Every structure is written in C-alpha cells, then in structure tokens.
Image (tube, helix red, strand yellow):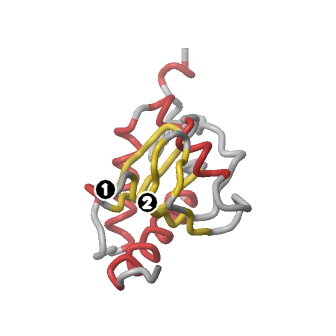
Amino acid sequence: MVEPPVMKEAIVEGRRLVERARAKGLPIAVAGWFRVGENGPPELYVATPDEWIYGPRPIIRLLRETLQETGATSFDLADVRVVDASTHFVNGAMNAGGDPTRERVIGPQLVGGRFVERAFVYACDPSATPSPMPPGSRRPHEADAA
C-alpha cells in the first residue's frame, strides 16, 4: 500500500519531532503513526515511561514546544497521543514487524489486543527509563526531593 503524500510528510515530520524530543531528554520507548481500528484516524503515538511518573502534561508541553520548533505543517498536537510505555499495546508495537531498533511498517494485525489497520513505527528504545526530572524541567520531581 502506498502512503498518500500528506502521510509521507507526517512520517518525516513526526520522526523529526521524536528525534528532537529525545535530544531534549524525553525517554521514548515507542513512537509511530498508528491507525487503530478499521476507520480510525492516523495518530502519532509517543510512548514514554515518564507518562506514568509525571503524567501527560509536562510531556505534552515539551512536545508542543518541540513541534513549534520543527515547523511541522502536516499535523498538530491534536494528532499526538502520549501513552505509558508499559502497556500491552506499546509492548506489542515494539515487538511487531521485526527488529524493534529499525523503522518498519506493520498491519493489518492485532497489536497488544487492539486491531491496527496500519502503522509506521520509528526505531524503538526498549531500554528507555524514566527521567530523573519532569520533561522540560530544570528541577527534580517533588517526590524525589523529599
């Protein structure tokens, strides 16, 4: 299946967003464009262990700033889903379609119990561990300071 031009651009711009967010210190276990369900919209999933510890707000803030810096035009923050890296869906996505350290296309198939029509998965980092500080922060998390 050939990707429409707008999706090809979103894949490139999504990769740029993920690379810059990682460079800023956001640990990302899995990221990629997923079309979940038969008619679901494509969404850029960003799975990070920081979501479980710090919640989605600091991650979304960091992604918003990074998205603005990249100048992406093919998608916006409403197309991004921040998820915890320890879910069955994320673990399934990491292991689907071959070598998790390489970019790949998967689907249609079940991934972690959910039907994925099609997905473009960026290189995964199975060793991603939580940040010592909230994403985009310069101070330790309050729980760590106690």
Quarter of the rendering containing residue 78 = bottom left
Residue sitting nearer the eye, 36 or 22: 36
Helix, strand or loop at disc 2? strand
The reply to whether dot 1 and dot 2 touch (C-beta < 8 Å) is yes
Q: Amino acid at mark 1?
A: Gly
Q: Amino acid at mark 2?
A: Glu
Quarter of the rendering containing residue 117 = bottom left
Location of mark 2 (residue):
117
What is the CA distance from the residue labelled 1 to the residue labelled 2? 8 Å
Rendered residue at 28%/76% (across/down): 73
Residue sitting nearer the eye, 23 or 77: 77
List x then y, in percent, for residue 103: 62, 69
Location of mark 1 (residue):
40
- 34 relative to 49 in the view: left or right: left
List x then y, in percent, for residue 55: 41, 32
- 45 relative to 65 in the view: left or right: right
Direction top: furthest residue:
146
> How busy is the neighbourhood of tag 1: few (under 14 within 10 Å), some, or many (20 plus)?
few
Residue 75: numbered disc: none
Rendered residue at 56%/36% (across/down): 88
List x then y, in percent, for residue 131: 59, 39
Rendered residue at 57%/22% (across/down): 144
Helix, strand or loop at disc 1? loop
